[in-house]
Image: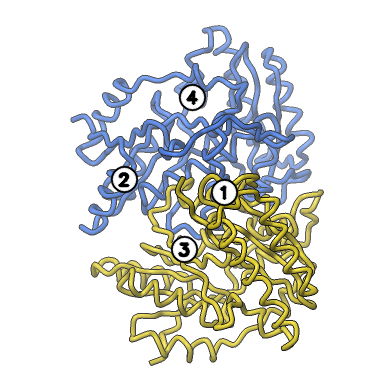
Chain colours: A blue, B yellow
Amino acid sequence: MEPEVIRDKEAMRRWSRAMRSQGMTIGLVPTMGYLHEGHLSLVRQSLTLADVTVVSIYVNPGQFSPTEDLSTYPSDFSGDLVKLAAISGGKVFVFNPSNLYDYGGGERKKVNTGGGRVVSCVEEGGGLGHETWIRVERLEKGLCGKSRPVFFRGVATIVTKLFNIVEPDVAVFGKKDYQQWRIIQRMVRDLDFGIEIVGSDIAREKDGLAMSSRNVRLSDEERQRALSISRSLAMAKASVAKGQTSCVELKDIIIQQLVGSDGRVDYVEIVDQETLEGVEQIKSGVVVCVAAWFGTVRLIDNIEINITL
Amino acid sequence: MEPEVIRDKEAMRRWSRAMRSQGMTIGLVPTMGYLHEGHLSLVRQSLTLADVTVVSIYVNPGQFSPTEDLSTYPSDFSGDLVKLAAISGGKVFVFNPSNLYDYGGGERKKVNTGGGRVVSCVEEGGGLGHETWIRVERLEKGLCGKSRPVFFRGVATIVTKLFNIVEPDVAVFGKKDYQQWRIIQRMVRDLDFGIEIVGSDIAREKDGLAMSSRNVRLSDEERQRALSISRSLAMAKASVAKGQTSCVELKDIIIQQLVGSDGRVDYVEIVDQETLEGVEQIKSGVVVCVAAWFGTVRLIDNIEINITL
C-alpha cells in the first residue's frame, strides 16, 4: 500500500497533532528523496521506535550554494513511493512540500546578502524572504564543513523547520553522515527540542561500499576502486585492535589504500565522537572519517572505534 | 494566590503536554523578572488569548556580552510572585529555571571562541558547552543591534529554547522592544514554529514615559528630561498627520527635543515596520525608534505611524 502523501505544512501539523492526541508517537526520517536501501533502513528503524513514521522528501535549497548542483539533484518520487509501499504496513506517511522558504505575500526583491558571508540558494530571494539561520558553531566547521560552508547551516535550519512542522517524538539520522548526525544531536540539546535523535548504523552493499545516492554515478571500474574506502577503514580499526594508537600511523594506512586505488583524498581525519575535534593519540572513542573522489564522484564514509582502557 | 513555580525543564514540558492533552491552550510571556506594569499588561493580554499562561523568569546570559551588566541585572523574585498573584486567578504559572545552558556531564574547558566573532557570556564555557545560535540575519543588524552585537542572537536562541520547553500556542511580546518583537515574529515564520506571536502595545506611565525596569535608575530630574522621548515621538506623529512625510524633517523634530532636554542620542530612526529598513519618505506604515541616554540610563521607545494613501 502506497503511503499517503501530505504536501501542505499546516495539514502536516494538524495530522501530527491529531495523531498525538490519540496517544500515538511519531517518528521522522528526513530525506531528499531518491531513496535507496540506506534510507529504507532508517525508516525501518523508525517504525520500531514510534507508532507511525513520517518520511519527508524535500530537496532543501538552503543547504546548496549557488555553485552546487541543486538543479540536477536526482529525484524519483513515484519510485520512492513504491519503495516505501513495500515496508509501510500503513504506518508510513510522506511529507512532500513544494517550497518551504516561500511564505507568501510581500515583495521579494533581489538583494545582495553576501558581504563575505555564506550564501545559499535561498538568500537569492532577499527582501522579505527567509533570513533566519541556525548554526552549530564549532561542530559545523571541520570535516565536510570546510569544503561546503553553507551546508550544515542549511541542514540545521531545514531540520528545525521539519521538527516544527511534523513535531515528532523521535527522528532517525544515518551515521553515514556522521557530522550531520552529531550536529543535529547537539542542536537538539542546545535548543531543548523535546525530540529523541537516533543515529542509525551505516547500510553497506555486500562488497562493503557505504550506500549513497551518488553510487549510481560510479563506473564499474571506479566502483571497484572505491571499495578501498571501506576496506581501509576496516584495516584501521583492526590496527587499533592490535594496539596501534597513533593517528598519524592510522591515517597513513588509509591514505595509502585510497591513493593506491587512484582515489583523490579530500580528507582523512580521526576525531572525537562528540566534539569532532582532531585526535593525535587514541585514548577514548573516536570516529575515522574519510571523503575521497573517485572519478567525478565524491564519497564519504566513516567507522566508529570504541576502546576501553 | 501565588502562581505555582516550575523550575525543571522536563517538568515544565510534561506540565505543558498534560495541559494540551486536556484541550487547554497555553500562552507564554518570556521575561527576565523584576516585573513592572508593562510585563503585567503582557500577562493580562496572554490570559485573554489562552486558557493558561506561563510567565518565564530567567535572566539569559546568552544575550549579554562579557562587558555588559549580567551580574548586576536587578531581580526580585518574591516581589514578582506577589505581583503575579494579584492577576493570576489560578491561571498563571511561573517557569524559573536555574541555568538553561548547563546540559550536565562532559568536561567544560575554557576555550577562545572569539576569532572576531560575537561572543556572549555563555561561550565562556566552551568545550562541550552550548554552541547553537539562531540569527535573524537582516533584522538583527540595525537599531539596537549596532551597539549590542550579541543581543538579538541571544534573544532568538533563548526564545527558541523556551518555545521548545513550554510548547505554547501563543506568545506575547511587548512592542516597546519593537525590533525584538519583529525578530521573533520573523524567526517563527522562517522556522515554522506552530506558535502565534502577539505584539502588545507599549505600557506608559501617566506622564507618557514608556515603562521599563531601568526607569527606577533615573533621578527625578533625569526622569523629567526623559519625558522628551515620548513627547517628541508624539510630535512627530502629529506632524505626519498634518502632511509632513520627510523623515529628515521628522527626525530633526525629535533630535531637537532630545538634545534640548540634555539627552544623548544613540539613534533616531524611521524604518519600515516589517523589514526595519530605513525610510526617507513616508509612503506606508513606519515605526519611529529612539534610543537615548539620560544620565547613565539608556532608554528606548518607539511609535508606529500607519498611513493610508
Residue A190 appears in the figure: yes
For the residues labelled 3 and 1, say whether their Cβ atoms are less than 8 Å apart: no
Q: Nearer the viewer, mark 3 or mark 1?
A: 1
Of B114 and B261, which appears nearest the observer?
B261
Where residue A41 sits: x, y (%)?
38, 35
Relative to B254, B199 lies left or right:
left
Residue A94: name its quadrant.
top left
Q: SS class of the residue under badge 4?
A: loop
* Distance of label 1 from label 2 (alpha carbons): 29 Å
Amino acid carrying label 4: it is Ser
Tell me the chain of label 2: A
The residue singled out by tag 1 in the image is: B272
Q: SS class of the residue under badge 1?
A: strand
Amino acid carrying label 3: it is Gly
The residue singled out by tag 4 in the image is: A212
Residue A182 appears in the figure: no
Vertical side of B293 occupied by B110: above or below: above
Q: Local crowd at mark 2 within 10 Å, few (<14), some, or many (≥20)?
A: some
Q: Residue furthest front?
A: B242
Which quadrant would the N terminus of chain B be assigned to in this image? bottom left
In the rendered image, residues at marks 2 and 3 fall on the same chain: no
